[in-house]
Image (cartoon, grey):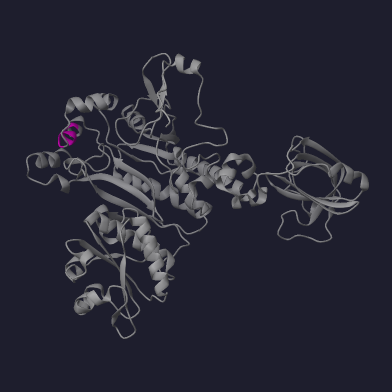
């Protein structure tokens, strides 16, 4: 027996007929059929049960109760004459002897129908999120999230990892995204920062002698929202291993993730170990992205040498990329509409031509490539029925556009995407350095604390001009699933000498490293073990498992796209007294 009830609303079956029961929940709906006949749908966390009102006296009790009020129902279970096979409790109903209001809904008009809340405006859903979550279709994502987090914890523990929580109030980091700052009342003029990630702490744990660490870590970044990223805060499966290599990290995640994805996912097929490994430069050339969706069979060809001089002005002096879509049967209207979508996403145009049933090049920019038909056909191995999408621009723009073409046409054209699976891959061998777009000088490409492949020797060769620093790769890796980056990770640079040399190449010396990262630098001087780690995003993981397009659908209380919690009113103004305690003055620009 459960407190205040004998059963849940999803529990009763035909075997319970004749029992005296007490149910509690929300009055989802009341349908009045006559003066002394009505049907209540009672809903709780576990399901729904039909309650049948058959007396005039009980009708007088039930009729005034507003929808979404919480009530208790005492009565007898009986078999339904018209069963509902779609409902778990559809073989029975409860005839009440007592109905009591536990919590009255004081509004006759709801902001939306609870069971159809996903059709409502998102602002209304976020403002009344507690009502939105009553919808079983919304609630199931939160249940899924709980189950996935529990499974991750269990698996990591079984693999010998220790769960350790790291500080939430920490020092501001000079790298990465914008920090959320917290004024320190006892230290006027100074601020804590909410951690963008537990990066430094987990590496310090390795120096402390912890062998395998993990946590479901809250992270805070003052970033703009997008479909797969929530503004403000997010959670990640943060892990680090001492005396470990890239192979050790790969082995753990390739063992932990596939069973969870296969068990809890919308699709029950997930990549088995070992996941495909794709060097970063190859990914950019072959897929036009460092987040390839391997469910799509389309790839990119560089046709600069073949088509670049065909006389079509946008190709002149640019890198030209092509994507061939075989067995294409869609209309010209479809091509134009999808090319427009590519342009919106990539900020660059996509062009096209087709190969007709006679092997002739037709449509789009075909008049420019007809003159080099044989070369183009040979280079792209063209055959009748092929559609060729072409884009051009500086290398990075051409790559980006080709990647958008692959994903957009691959998802839209039948036969080119095996959607119902989770396809994992590792992107490896990231460049250590790049030329900054604004500075025009050598800068770190991604994570400055990754171990450069080849270690100190490689950096010294670059410093002496023996090799181009742009050819140095880092022992860094990304985990990608279905075109979504789940995580970045790396073998860490644990040697102060190598760390200083890596920073010297970007015009920063030992004093800069000490000043910006004092805790890590000092700790590494006390004998640091080689270590490596990664931190897959829990929110993105659950979003993929649930088959949702928006990450807000799997977060219990998400912010909107402007990083506002419109339910609680955050961020909000505070009193002058609070500001005075913190020695803060707010200086806002004057409104015109």
Viewer-proximal residue, 580 or 380?
A: 580
Q: Quadrant location of residue 324?
A: bottom left
Q: With respect to residue 123, does 34 lie above or below?
A: below
Residue 391 among those drawn in magenta = no
Identified at 33% across, 44% down, the residue is 248
- Left or right? Give the position of 7 relative to 569: right
Answer with the quarter of the image where residue 489 lies: top left
Left or right of residue 21: residue 530: left
Which quarter of the figure has residue 387?
A: bottom left
- Is 501 one of the magenta-colored residues? yes
Residue for point 28% across, 61% down: 286
- Compared to 160, does 478 lie above or below? below
Q: Can residue 82 be seen?
A: yes
Across and down, in percent, residue 421 comes to: 46, 60
Quarter of the image with the C terminus in it: top left
Most prominent secondary structure in the magenta stretch?
helix
Horizontal and vertical percent for residue 57? Answer: 92, 44
Say whether residue 526 is visible. Answer: no
Towards the viewer: 131 or 554: 131
| As drawn, 342 above or below 387 | above
Give residue 31's position: percent from left, percent from top. Answer: 80, 52
Q: Report the front residue among 121 and 475.
A: 121
**Residue 120 horizontal/vertical position (percent):** 60, 50
Q: Quadrant of the N terminus?
A: top right
Magenta-highlighted residues: 500-505
């Amino acid at each position: 027996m459960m407190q205040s009830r004998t059963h849940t609303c999803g529990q009763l079956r035909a075997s319970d007929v004749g029992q005296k029961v007490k149910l509690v929940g929300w009055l989802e709906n009341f349908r009045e059929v006559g003066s002394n006949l009505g049907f209540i749908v009672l809903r709780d966390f576990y399901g729904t049960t039909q309650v049948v009102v058959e007396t005039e006296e009980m009708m007088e009790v039930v009729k005034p109760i507003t929808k979404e009020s919480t009530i208790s129902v005492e009565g007898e279970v009986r078999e339904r004459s018209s069963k509902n096979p779609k409902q778990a409790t559809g073989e029975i109903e409860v005839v009440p002897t007592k109905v009591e209001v536990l919590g009255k809904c004081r509004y006759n008009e709801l902001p939306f129908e609870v069971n159809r809340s996903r059709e409502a405006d998102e602002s209304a859903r976020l403002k009344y999120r507690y009502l939105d979550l009553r919808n079983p279709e919304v609630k199931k994502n939160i249940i899924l999230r709980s189950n996935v987090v529990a499974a991750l914890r269990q698996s990591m523990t079984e693999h010998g990892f220790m769960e350790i929580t790291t500080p939430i109030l920490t020092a501001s980091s000079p790298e990465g995204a914008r920090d959320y700052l917290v004024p320190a009342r006892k230290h006027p003029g100074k601020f804590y920062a909410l951690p963008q990630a537990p990066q430094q702490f987990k590496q310090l744990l390795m120096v402390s002698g912890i062998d395998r660490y993990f946590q479901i870590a809250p992270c805070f970044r003052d970033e703009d929202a997008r479909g797969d990223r929530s503004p403000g805060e997010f959670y990640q499966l943060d892990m680090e291993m001492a005396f470990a290599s890239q192979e050790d990290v790969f082995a753990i995640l390739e063992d932990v993730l596939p069973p969870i994805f296969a068990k809890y996912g919308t699709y029950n097929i997930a990549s088995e170990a070992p996941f495909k490994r794709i060097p970063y430069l190859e990914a950019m050339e072959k897929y036009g992205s460092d987040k390839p969706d391997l469910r799509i069979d389309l790839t990119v060809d560089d046709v600069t040498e073949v088509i670049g001089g065909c006389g079509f002005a946008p190709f002149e002096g640019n890198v030209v990329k092509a994507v061939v879509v075989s067995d294409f049967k869609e209309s010209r209207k479809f091509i134009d509409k999808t090319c427009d979508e590519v342009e919106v996403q990539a900020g660059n145009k996509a062009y096209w031509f087709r190969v007709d049933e006679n092997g002739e090049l037709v449509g789009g920019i075909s008049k420019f490539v007809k003159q080099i038909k044989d070369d183009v056909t040979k280079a792209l191995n063209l055959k009748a029925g092929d559609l060729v999408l072409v884009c051009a621009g500086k290398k990075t723009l051409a790559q980006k556009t080709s990647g958008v073409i692959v994903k957009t046409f691959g998802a839209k054209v039948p036969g080119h995407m095996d959607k119902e699976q989770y396809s994992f891959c590792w992107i490896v061998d990231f460049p250590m350095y790049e030329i900054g777009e604004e500075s025009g000088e050598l800068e770190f490409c991604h994570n400055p604390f990754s171990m450069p492949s080849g270690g100190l020797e490689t950096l010294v060769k670059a410093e002496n001009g023996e090799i181009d620093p742009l050819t140095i790769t880092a022992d860094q890796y990304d985990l990608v699933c279905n075109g979504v980056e789940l995580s970045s990770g790396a073998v860490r640079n644990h040697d102060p000498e190598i760390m200083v040399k890596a920073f010297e190449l970007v015009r920063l010396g030992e004093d800069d490293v000490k000043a910006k990262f004092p805790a890590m630098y000092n700790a590494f001087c006390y004998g640091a073990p080689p270590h490596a780690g990664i931190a897959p995003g829990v929110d993105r993981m659950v979003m993929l498992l649930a088959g949702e397009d928006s990450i807000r659908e799997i977060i219990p209380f998400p912010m909107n796209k402007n990083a506002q919690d419109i339910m609680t009113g955050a961020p909000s103004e505070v009193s002058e007294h609070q500001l005075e305690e913190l020695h803060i003055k707010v200086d806002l620009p004057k409104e015109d």
